[in-house]
Amino acid sequence: MRARRRLIGTRCSGRSPRLVGSGGATDGNGLAAGAGATTVVRPAGSQFLVLTNVNRMKVVLPFEESDAAQIKPGQNATVQVDSLPDVTLNGAVEQVAPSATDISGVIAYYVTVNLDSSDSRLKDGQTARGTVLTVERDNVLSVANAATRKQGNNSIVIVLGPGSQQRTVVFQPGAVGAERTEVLSGLTEGEHVVLPSGSS
């Protein structure tokens, strides 16, 4: 186990977001209408054009409802574009769609992230993956998520003791990140926690 580990919270649940030029129109589900000249139908039925800034991009990410409940405007986010594996873009949440969308039977909410910078290789409509930082803890004890299990209502880990004896230990978890879980009580720094085979 390690202390002083920063925990990252909610992670995007899928790979069906879209990169769009900033300033584009947004429909009721938070999907931006696109870059360039976009035709949008107003409730009255007339049409108008929305010109977008293709030098500043946004990404629209679907989050499962339990994750979306933790996301708020202004939270920091990172985005990786599938076609540009060497690029990691920083940004901030602009909005969370007020209406849910059914994606293959899973209820999701679209989250729009404004990117702080752009890249000439980014194109409208590319797919990406994103992570939103919802909880941040510094100077805390944490354990790898792969080592934790549920036993009834308890969170447990297997601890390696003297003589390689293994024992089950119940601990109280705090914030749960993408890779690590905060430990509030039940474990102490320096204990050896057993990871499943194949975990690092």
Image: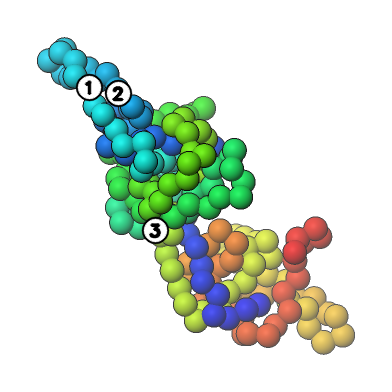
Residue 51, percent from left and from top: 26, 29
Q: Secondary structure at mark 3?
A: strand
Does label 3 or label 1 sit earlier along the sequence? 1
Q: Residue furthest top?
A: 45
Q: Amino acid at mark 3?
A: Asn
- Could you tell whether 82 is left or right of 169 in the image? left
Residue at 16% x, 12% y: name it: 45
When the figure is inspected, residue 185 is found, relative to residue 74, above or below; the finding is below
| Crowding near the residue tagged with mark 1, few <14, some 14–19, many ≥20 C-alpha atoms within 10 Å | few
- Measure how far apart labels 2 and 1 are at the Cα level: 6 Å
Residue 195, percent from left and from top: 75, 66
Camera-near label (3 vs 2) is 2
Does label 3 or label 2 sit earlier along the sequence? 2
List the residue tagged with mark 1: 49
Camera-near label (3 vs 1) is 1
Q: Amino acid at mark 2?
A: Ala
Q: Quadrant of residue 133?
A: bottom left
Residue 174, percent from left and from top: 48, 70
- Could you tell whether 82 is left or right of 196 in the image? left
Q: Which mark is residue 37?
A: 2
Q: Quadrant of residue 160?
A: bottom right
Q: In front: 135, or 193?
A: 135
- Measure how far apart labels 3 and 2 are at the Cα level: 29 Å
Residue at 75% x, 60% y: name it: 199
Q: Secondary structure at mark 1?
A: strand
Residue 198, percent from left and from top: 80, 58
Q: In front: 115, or 102?
A: 115
Q: Which mark is residue 76?
A: 3
- Could you tell whether 60 is left or right of 177 in the image? left
Tag 2 near tag 1, CB within 8 Å: yes
